[in-house]
Image (cartoon, grey):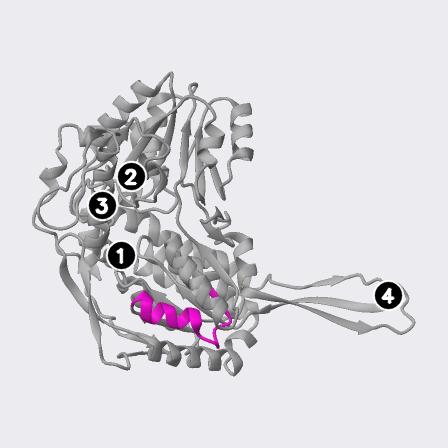
Amino acid sequence: MAAARRIASSLLACSSSYSSPALVLSLLRQGSASRVLRGVSTASLIEEPIHPPVQVNYTQLLINGDFVDSASGKTFPTLDPRTGEVIAHVAEGDAEDINRAVIAARKAFDEGPWPKMTGYERSCILNRFADLIEKHNDEIAALESWDSGKPYQQSYRSEIPTVARLMRYYAGWADKIHGLIVPADSQHHVQVLHEPIGVAGQIIPWNFPLLMYAWKIGPALACGNTIVLKTAEQTPLSALYVSKLLLEAGLPAGVLNVISGFGPTAGAAIASHMDVDKLAFTGSTDTGKIVLELSAKSNLKPVTLELGGKSPMIIMDDADIDRAVALAHVALFFNQGQCCSAGSRTFVHERIYDEFVEKAKARALKRIVGDPFKKGVEQGPQIDEEQFSKILRYIKSGIDSGATLVTGGDRIGNKGYYIQPTIFSDVQDEMKIAQDEIFGPVQSILKDLNEVIRRANASRYGLAAGVVTKNIDTANTLMRALRAGSVWINCFDVAGAAIPFGGYKMSGHGRERGIDSLMNYLQVKAVVTPLKNPAWL
């Protein structure tokens, strides 16, 4: 522990790297980022990888309170995106393991103490869990960055503290979930009860492993449900680690079961299981369709989907160009561009277009790409070879379709999955790079000649949007007209425990975070009782 903290302190000594969009913009305003970045080439930081300050101790499945091998005995490797080399071999769960986990979760719900506890008792356990996350913040952050490739300071300073914040938020809700007494049109007493839904199946992605873990388990546990959760096969390590802490905090056996495995086997088994009462999925739109179909074909379980996006970032002609460039840069390149809400269609007013493109290029050229454990690094590797190759194919598509490659466009080094920050200008609406979710560090800048509302909405997605303007009337017009679940005015990717998140159209349905997320895990029951000679109605 002490050694890990010493290394963490060393890694945090340089403040140029950011842990969140808000932090990087703060650094840009202060000028510290530009001082560090000046004259440094991205390639210069691709060196021999730093060994992360943490050990991998949990690689088995968590079922009924115990870490166990998979029924088949199979394992699979989880890889270091910096090198493509094996970090650890993790138990490979499949349909049999999902069934074991569902049986444990069902017994814990039907016979165990969790749903029968008072909300206050549940809140105490969630708050103790938050305490333990804060205590082990450095080790958890190291696992998260090692497995996913995201900058260590991003994990350490922002994402892991946010997990603790989310747990405290949902702990606060646990004893405040209640029903209603509603009037009847006759002599009857009517109660509306909000009951836990039962066994919740949850499938989380690889781009924000622990944040998505918290988004899923927080409301489900606060409402008194039990859970079977499948991690992404690319990033299983951090969820297993923190689940051990949740047991340590006092969570009863069987309430949370964590299965590492693959989508076609373990994921499909959760979606189609007849004894799973509710499903929540975060991932691609194509996989979301499969999950929804499997759920419908089994027991018609309700499904919450948080899916892909192709979010517009609209820069009006009255915007402060330097600030707009900084916002648009973070909106796209944050988390290696692997963000479902990324502002990946940058619409810039024609009057300031050329200046914006030049300044966006200058900022991209200063971006430091390298080992996420190295001081000053802003961008680590992409998650794996499949995603790496997909991004490079989209870059080639942009070139082939006639867009202007302003900067970037190639890999960095010959080891790991590093890609240059890439910008295209002269992008047209019909190009693949303007239509598809690339999920990588590729910014497409489109010239806003007219009809920006129609063009921004002309997408199968509707997850998020950004607007940069000094005119409040323009802001109000756009924020009401844009068909997206989140609209950020003069900011981007601002998130909070109470702020709902989800999409329109093929970006999914239902909402994560906030009070709306609780309703995903509650059943509504009306109880009607006759009244004899009531004094009032």
Q: Nearer the viewer, residue 117 or 396?
A: 396
Q: Which element type, helix, strand or loop, lies under badge 4?
A: loop
Q: Who comes first in sequence, dot 3 or dot 2?
A: 3
Q: Which residue is mark 4?
A: 186
**Three-letter amino acid code at the position of disc 2:** Phe
At which x and y percent is residue 508? 47, 52
**Three-letter amino acid code at the position of disc 3:** Leu
Q: Who comes first in sequence, dot 1 or dot 4?
A: 1
Instruction: Name which residue lies at 18% across and 49% down.
Output: 373
At which x and y percent is residue 317? 42, 19
Q: Which mark is residue 333?
A: 2
Q: Who comes first in sequence, dot 1 or dot 3?
A: 3
Q: Which residue is mark 3?
A: 12
Classify 445 as above or below 288. Answer: above
Residue furthest to the top: 351
Disc 3/disc 2 C-alpha distance (Å): 21 Å
Classify 44 as above or below 425. Answer: below
Q: Which residue is mark 1?
A: 144
Q: Quadrant of residue 412?
A: top left
Check residue 119 for magenta coloring: no
Disc 2 to disc 4: CB gap under 8 Å: no
User: Which segment did they paint magenta?
Assistant: 262-279
